[in-house]
Amino acid sequence: MHIAIVGNIGAGKTTLANKLAHHFNWEVFLEDVDHNPYLKDFYDDMPRWAFHLQVYFLNSRFRQVQRIKELQRAGKGVIQDRTIYEDAHIFAANLHESRLMTERDYQNYCNLFESMISMVDAPDLLLYLKADLPKLIQQIEKRNRDYENNIKIEYLKNLNEHYEKWISGYKNGKLLVIDVNNLDYVHNPEDLGIVIERINSTLFGLF
Ligand SMILES: Nc1ncnc2c1ncn2[C@@H]1O[C@H](COP(=O)(O)OP(=O)(O)O)[C@@H](O)[C@H]1O
Ligand SMILES: Nc1ncnc2c1ncn2[C@H]1C[C@H](O)[C@@H](COP(=O)(O)O)O1
């Protein structure tokens, strides 16, 4: 079983991924953030570092996909925090549309993505955490990563629009959309229970 959690920056993916991994006793795959050699530079100067960062994330996500396949073959369950689809359909597409990535770099990136995606299996469940801008801003501030302090509201808004468009056309497998605006699974166990019930019901038809 492979559940992938998708959603905008600060939506609560990592927090939920850890909680679900604990609940189901499955492996968790988190994003390569703390050791990412480009992320801080990217936030300082997006046009300069956009392509480098996208290639870095694409490769790290692709490696993750290979490790997830191995675990699945061994019969293990996996929770994944963010997917390779989001790199291309959300972040790279947004950088291109916002003219922060050149046409030439974007086409080069898309060709690379196309070569890789044929070797990627869709998750058994794509769990989209849908959050409005105030919730995202509040949670990004709460997390307080220094390089994210200058993220523009416009950037988050554009990413949210890309998420809505992508999710509305997602046909690769089961999809569960959870509005997290009024959920607090950090402090309220009942809220975590609601999410788990909805996952069980979507995956196994329970409840
Ligand atoms: N539903 C929630 N309610 C309240 N706080 C949350 C919720 N989800 C996440 N948080 C908090 O918001 C911050 C960002 O969450 P995180 O899981 O790192 O988001 P993401 O991985 O999507 O960027 C963390 O400090 C986390 O404790
Ligand atoms: N593909 C990406 N392009 C640009 N930025 C990205 C990409 N994937 C992740 N990020 C950024 C967004 C956040 O600042 C960190 C971690 O993501 P989070 O949603 O907080 O888990 O990396």
Image (spheres, rainbow, N blue to C red):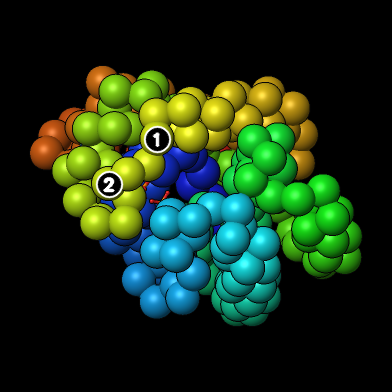
What's the amino acid at mark 1?
A: Lys
- Residue 7's place in the image compared with 46, above or below, is above
For the C terminus, the quadrant is top left
Residue 58 vs residue 196, the one in the foreground: 58
Q: Position of residue 73 (x, y in %)?
A: 66, 75
- Residue 199's place in the image compared with 179, above or below, is below
For the N terminus, the quadrant is bottom right
Q: Measuring 84% from the left and 61% from the top, which residue is drawn there?
A: 108
Q: How many marks?
A: 2
102 displayed left or right of 12: right
Say whether residue 164 is visible: yes
Residue designated by label 2: 149
- Secondary structure at numbered mark 1: loop
173 displayed left or right of 3: right
Circle on res. 58 = none
Could you say which quadrant of the image residue 121 lies in? bottom right
Residue designated by label 1: 152
Q: Measuring 11% from the left and 39% from the top, which residue is drawn there?
A: 187
Q: Measuring 51% from the left and 43% from the top, which residue is drawn there?
A: 6
